[in-house]
Amino acid sequence: DTAVSQTPKYLVTQMGNDKSIKCEQNLGHDTMYWYKQDSKKFLKIMFSYNNKELIINETVPNRFSPKSPDKAHLNLHINSLELGDSAVYFCASSQGLRELAKNIQYFGAGTRLSVL
Amino acid sequence: DQQVKQNSPSLSVQEGRISILNCDYTNSMFDYFLWYKKYPAEGPTFLISISSIKDKNEDGRFTVFLNKSAKHLSLHIVPSQPGDSAVYFCAASEDSGAGSYQLTFGKGTKLSVIP
């Protein structure tokens, strides 16, 4: 039973389209994250939500909007897709408590987005 | 500006020998360090971690060493097995507030264990 699941696994779309990536975790965690792994293989934090509240919002274009309907889900909506958005997007979750050992993050398998 | 650096993009080791993966960081606010392992087409999987108040943590074949003064950590795998072949990411954590910990990742080191 997958702990952090993302859909779809692959997403190929045209420039200018709007698309969404869904993420769900069944670990009972309070905090969820979105990361982007670019062509240089760097994994960079994009957003973090704790109990449906936005905590981290790195310098990401406002075309990217995370939405958390409940603490088990954090979806990523991307408007007006650009070529540079092509990357692998990873969702993650953690217990999010104020104890260092609780900040271990568990990752989904990733969504490979290709913008043509 | 890379705050977490893994300067070796790849490493090849003979099966049964020790693998040593290195990681350097620059941000003194990091207080927790983690190693993740990643197979192709999968997400990173947590492997082992260490708090900044310790200098060593061991879990089976995996040991992580932390040298705070040098801002350096290393992952030792002994003995190395072919199934250990993967990309290893070093990550450092700092408290972003409200129960959220921001992980900063290195670029990864691809380990190949040769049978």
Image: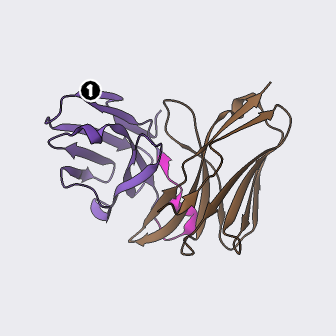
Q: Mark 1 points at which residue?
A: A12
**Would you say B19 lies left or right of A64 here?**
right
Badge 1 sits on which subunit? A
Residue that appears at 71% across and 71% down: B70
Looking at the image, which is closer to me, A75 or B79?
B79
Residue A89 appears at what percent x and percent y?
A: 37, 41
Q: Can residue B111 be seen in this view?
A: yes
Chain drawn in purple: A
User: What colour do you see for chain B?
Assistant: brown
Give neighbour class at mark 1: few <14, some 14-19, many 20+ (Cα, 10 Å).
Answer: few
Q: How many labels does the image show?
A: 1
Question: Could you tell me which secondary element the residue under label 1 belongs to?
Answer: strand
Q: Is residue B107 above or below residue B82?
A: below
Specify the farthest residue to the top.
B115
Residue located farthest toward the right when viewing the structure as drawn = B16
Q: Residue at the location (27% across, 63% down)?
A: A53
* Left or right for B7, reference A113: right
User: Where is residue A76 shown, x and y percent of the image?
Assistant: 26, 45
Q: Magenta residues, as a range?
A: A97-106
> A55 or B8, which is in the foreground?
B8
Residue B7 locus on image (x, y percent): 63, 52
The image shows residue B115 at horizontal and vertical percentages of 80, 24
Name above or below for residue A91 compared with residue A94. Answer: above
Residue found 35% across the figure and 42% down from its top: A24
